[in-house]
């Protein structure tokens, strides 16, 4: 440099670059933490949503049912989880709900609900399949002391959520 010119020395420049690098590293780590936290939060909320959907639908149908069957029918290709049935006292329609598991990637399952309606003469008047829940890693449904116990576990991504439900069936008259 010529005398009278002002500028930065090599040491000042090195210190400035080091400070900027530290600030950039800190910002990068913060962004990474926010993104990972968001992913964990999204996975957890998805897991909660899935087990609640399964619990609500199965509980509601079980309270309506006159018969509950937890035995898988080997004659069908699906893995039946629960079969529920009732007769509508107003018109004699017979409602049959079958919950089945279907494979997903990674060993997880989808829980689907088929609702078949037959009129009093035995003619099918309705047949609908709906997706109830995904990412199901474990589920059980058993009767204990005249109360049905449902346990559902979902595992989307890195989060796992398990819920237990107790369902009292309706009193048949």
Image: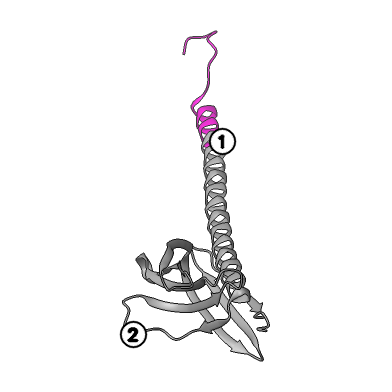
Name the element at disc 1.
Answer: helix
Residue lying at the far front in this picture: please name it: 121
Residue ID at (59%, 88%): 143
Which is nearer the eye, 23 or 114? 114
Residue 87 drawn above or below residue 145? above
Reply yes or no: does residue 16 show up in magenta: yes
Which is nearer the eye, 99 or 42? 99
Please give the count of numbered marks on the rendered protein.
2
Left or right of 77? Residue 160 is right
Q: Indicate the quadrant containing the C terminus: top left, top right, bottom left or bottom right.
A: bottom right
Residue 17 drawn above or below residue 54? above
Q: Dot 2 surroundings within 10 Å: few (below 14), some, or many (20 or more)?
A: few
Left or right of 93? Residue 145 is right
Residue ID at (63%, 90%): 144
Magenta highlight range: 1-18
Upstream in sequence: badge 1 or badge 2: 1
Quarter of image, res 72: bottom left
Residue lying at the far top in this picture: please name it: 4
Q: Tell me where residue 168 appears, x and y as whole percent.
A: 67, 80
Quarter of image, res 91: bottom right
The label number, if any, that marks residue 74 in the structure image: 2
The label number, if any, that marks residue 19 in the structure image: 1
Q: Tell me where residue 33 appears, x and y as whole percent.
A: 56, 50
Q: How is the image coloured?
A: one colour
Reply yes or no: does residue 129 show up in magenta: no
């Amino acid at each position: 440099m010529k005398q009278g010119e002002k500028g930065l020395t090599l040491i000042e420049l090195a210190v400035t670059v080091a400070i900027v690098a530290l600030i950039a590293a800190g910002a990068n780590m913060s962004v990474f933490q926010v993104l990972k936290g968001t992913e964990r939060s999204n996975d957890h909320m998805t897991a909660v949503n899935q087990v609640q959907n399964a619990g609500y639908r199965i509980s509601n149908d079980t309270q309506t049912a006159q018969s509950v069957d937890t035995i898988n029918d080997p004659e069908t290709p699906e893995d039946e989880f629960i079969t529920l049935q009732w007769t509508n006292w107003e018109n004699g329609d017979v409602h049959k709900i079958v919950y089945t598991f279907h494979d997903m990637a990674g060993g997880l399952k989808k829980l689907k609900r088929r609702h078949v309606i037959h009129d009093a003469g035995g003619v099918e008047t309705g047949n609908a399949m709906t997706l109830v829940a995904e990412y199901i890693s474990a589920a059980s449904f058993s009767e204990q002391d005249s109360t049905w116990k449902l346990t559902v576990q979902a595992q989307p991504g890195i989060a796992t959520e398990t819920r237990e439900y107790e369902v009292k069936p309706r009193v048949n008259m």
